[in-house]
Amino acid sequence: MKRVWWAVAFVVVAMIGGALYQNWTEPARSQTAPVPQRGSAGVPVVVATAVAQPMPVRVDTIGTVQPIAMVSIKSRIDGYIDSVLIQDGQYVKAGDVMFRLDARAAQAQVAQTQAQVARDQAQHGNAKRNVDRDAPIVGKDFMSKQQFDTDTTTAQALEATTAADAAALENAKVLLSYDTITAPIDGRVGAITIKAGNSIKSNDVPLATINQIKPIYVSFSLPQSELPALREAMGKGAVSVSVRPQGDEGAPILGAVQFYDNSVDVTSGTINVRAQFTNDDQRLWPGQFVDVSMTTRTDPNAIVVPPAAVQVGQDTDYVFVVKSDQTAELRPVKVGRTIDGKTVIADGVHAGDKVVTDGQMRLSNGVRVDIRSTSDVAKPDQAS
């Protein structure tokens, strides 16, 4: 009997709890119920008109800045650094004195060689005068022919000795010039690695490095498919290139293609191209990464749409075109390029077509649309 009463009590409690739960959840359900959307003749969308206009054929890539010349400054002789006449990072011009070595030994060698030259020149002069005096009398038998030949040989030998002395003097002067190390090119000096007071060896550790930065190169790679257009453009004149150093908010820096390599890299399918810039303001720095834009030609009648109109599909890109009966048509398109916020359509859209730029998420082929302004179309994350 107790079991029956317990069962009845459990049923009653369950019925009361169910009634209370229903009363509590009804208000919450009424609060979260979706708000009916306003009636519309079609899916609200924003459209733009495809237009035909001139558009540059431009290649965008990444490049690196390279000095036209980079010279490692080394000593040509063994010596002792007497003085350093430049500072780290200094801009130098060709011919500026950078280092001076202890030149006393070389100066003494030059003086010694000059003395030898003077001595041998005097001896050669005396021998030549003897030959000149002997020439008239040798034919009159006042002097033996053998003695005259000996005097002539002596004069010729001293002439050769004088010439050798002159060469030795020139060599000594060259060696003396090596004690003064000058800049071979215009450019900016890096860190000076060896200071005054150190002994150095011939052609050993670089004393400093000079990078030529005015003008300067930017090197970049292009796909081999762009090579025919580049060659055709260079055949017609200078091909302009604009670069902007990464992190630089200034105006693009303008230059021109100066060289492209004589072969395509078989591993990457690219070709190396080099552009030259005057770099008077020194915004380009060796080793820097830059954004490169190269224009090979201008397409006079390119079909242009906003980038937002192009959707990415599984097989191809596509756009929705609004037809004259206010229905959407899905059209596969071939995208040429996107430049300065404008997308060039190579195939699939004609000038004057109205393409959907907002609201594509609710569209399918043949759906009726309602063209609105941008402010009237709810974004997907704002929908109730």
Image: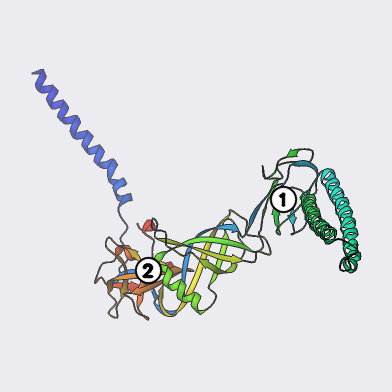
* Furthest-left residue in this view: 1
**How many C-alpha atoms fall within 10 Å of the one at disc 2: few (<14), some, or many (≥20)?**
many
- In the foreground, 310 or 291: 291
- In this orientation, does residue 373 appear? no
Residue 89, labelled with which disc? 1
Q: Do we see residue 217 in this rendering?
A: yes
Which of label 1 and label 2 is nearer to you? Answer: 1
Q: Say which residue appears at 87% left-offset and 49% top-offset.
A: 111
Please state if 2 lies on the left or on the right of 44 as rendered.
left
Residue under numbered circle 2: 309
Q: Earlier in the sequence, mark 1 or mark 2?
A: 1
Residue at position x 63%, y 56% in the image: 285
Give, as a three-letter code, the residue at label 2: Ala
Indicate the position of residue 81 as horizontal and vertical percent values.
Answer: 78, 42
What's the distance in space between the residues labelled 1 and 2, CA to CA?
52 Å
Measured as percent of width and height from the top left, residue 257 is found at 54, 69
Residue at image location 36% in from the left, 69% down from the top = 335
